[in-house]
Image (cartoon, coloured by chain):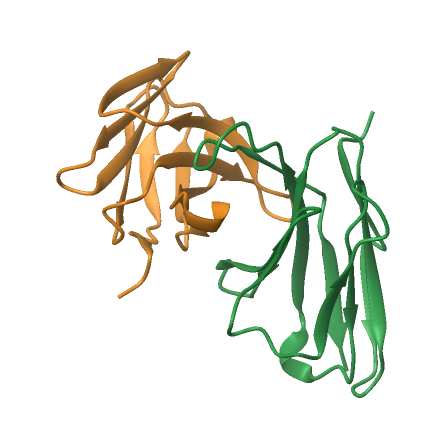
Chain colours: A green, B orange
Amino acid sequence: DTAVSQTPKYLVTQMGNDKSIKCEQNLGHDTMYWYKQDSKKFLKIMFSYNNKELIINETVPNRFSPKSPDKAHLNLHINSLELGDSAVYFCASSQALSRGTDTQYFGPGTRLTVL
Amino acid sequence: QKEVEQNSGPLSVPEGAIASLNCTYSDRGSQSFFWYRQYSGKSPELIMFIYSNGDKEDGRFTAQLNKASQYVSLLIRDSQPSDSATYLCAVNRGISNQFYFGTGTSLTVIP
């Protein structure tokens, strides 16, 4: 029973291409997130999203966009890929019992390599 | 100033010793604090969380929170080689329910 799943696990592509990473959670959580983890292991939040609000980290380029077809899915679209986009991307979800008390559960990650 | 700061290590301890991992955070309004363990090539895995000042124990793990000093720590008793991993400290500021992670501390437990 995979709680948070991501596809693909590995993604190798050329600079300038457009790609998507899919995320699904079966925990019934209200909020989903995307994180980028660079080569130095720093985990940086990109987006958080529930059915009421999308919160975007202001440092994320607008080439990145989250798409949520329903509460259980949050996909990440990336346009015009650049070398610096190479990283591991993690999806996560949480159930907001009350603000500030959430715990997050992570997907297995997608390793994106831009050539 | 970073939201969450950790000593990147590496930290090495002998098997059976106590490993002490530290974390400081910048936003005094932060409400909840988390420790994650991440093995190489794997996703972060929640170890424990703490909301209130003081200690919280779960098996071999103890989280300690001092909001006045904006400091949270994780103690691992009777360290095992399987504890060798990167430990990530995370903070939820409450506002917008955003999580901020430190850069992680690499721990090696030597048999």
Q: Quadrant of residue B34?
A: top left
Q: Quadrant of residue A92?
A: top right
In this view, A105 is above or below A20: above
Q: How many marks?
A: 0
In this view, B101 is above or below A10: above
Residue at (62%, 80%) from the top-left corner? A84
Query: Looking at the figure, which quarter contains the N terminus of chain B?
Result: bottom left
Residue at (29%, 23%) from the top-left corner? B17
The percent coordinates of residue A80 (x first, y second) are: 78, 85
Horizontally, is A86 left or right of A22 in the view? left
The percent coordinates of residue A4 (x first, y second) are: 75, 38
Horizontally, is B108 left or right of B19 in the view? right
The percent coordinates of residue B86 (x first, y second) are: 46, 44
Q: Is residue A14 visible?
A: yes
Query: Looking at the figure, which quarter contains the C terminus of chain B?
Result: top left
Horizontally, is A49 left or right of B2 in the view? right
Horizontally, is A45 left or right of A1 in the view? left
**Considering depth in this image, is B111 or B43 the residue closer to the camera?**
B43
Residue at (75%, 81%) from the top-left corner? A81
**Considering depth in this image, is A50 or A39 the residue closer to the camera?**
A50
Q: Quadrant of residue A104?
A: top right
Q: Point out the residue furthest to the left here.
A: B68
In this view, A5 is above or below A37: above
Q: Is residue B98 visible?
A: no
**Considering depth in this image, is B70 or B87 the residue closer to the camera?**
B70
Q: Point out the residue furthest to the top here.
A: B59
Q: Point out the residue furthest to the bottom here.
A: A16
